[in-house]
Amino acid sequence: MTRLFILILVFVQNSFAIEGVYTVIVQKQEQKKQSRWSLADWLATKKRIALMDQWLALNTESNIFEMIVDYQHYEFDDAFLSETKVSDRANLKMFVTLLGLEAEKEWSTSQLKTNHYNLSLRLLGSSQQSTHVNLLWGYKEIETRIYGDYRTQFYGAEGDLYLLSFLGASGRFEKIRQRANTISKVEGEKSRFGGFLEFYFIRLYYHKTIEKYSFDSGTSVTRKERNGDTFGISLYL
């Protein structure tokens, strides 16, 4: 009986010893596997580095400071008067790397005109004269002769897509948050899309512009639209 117990004890000890050796061997193999070099790994790493270099090349800031001066001539159908109206707008944008400030002033004989100022954050692109996408947030002043004046927030996005070095497409969308005065509440949205030609620091462009506004007096809701064509020129300084 004593011999049997000794044999069992020796067997158990040997089993633990074998298991320990096996564990060490497995761990050593895992370490070798992690540090192993192969052609497939090298190609995969090279591809990842190439993609990272491409992203950095597209998004690395080439200019610390940018300023854009812009003039727009807007011809549109005025839903308030059911006739064609025109307005002129001046716009100024200033960017420091990714962050920008924008202000726009409108002069019009229409029943409605807007001014705005906002922050811009560039998510994609190395400058405003490259393919880029910006997020927008700011304040819009809406002046009407019938429903009074409003100062409300808006948010949106804008961007340019260069098809050639001198030719591209652009677009912008703004969502106007609801705001009330003593007469009614207003909310709406504005979108524009079109194309541009660029010659060095000068850009000529055309946009189709669509504006939608909703005025809620509490007893009725009136919806007005301004749809038209915008022609403009921008100077990139």
Image (cartoon, grey):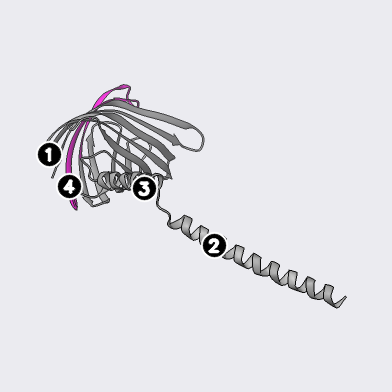
Which element carries disc 4, helix, strand or loop?
strand
Q: Is disc 1 in contact with disc 4, using a CB cutoff of under 8 Å?
A: no
Per the image, the residue denoted by label 4 is 67
In this picture, is 161 found above or below 126?
Answer: above
The amino acid sitting under disc 4 is Met
Residue 147 can be seen, yes or no: yes
Gap in angstroms between the C-alphas marked 4 and 3: 44 Å
Q: Is 127 colored magenta in this rendering?
A: no
Q: Which residue is mark 2?
A: 27
- Verify whether residue 74 appears in magenta: yes
Residue plotted at (47% across, 37% down): 217
The numbered mark at residue 201 is 1
Q: Residues within 10 Å of mark 2 (few under 14, many from 20)?
A: few
Distance, label 2 to label 1, CA atoms, is: 62 Å
Q: Amino acid at mark 1?
A: Phe
Eye-nearest disc, 3 or 1: 3
Quadrant showing the C terminus? top left
Q: Earlier in the sequence, mark 2 or mark 1?
A: 2
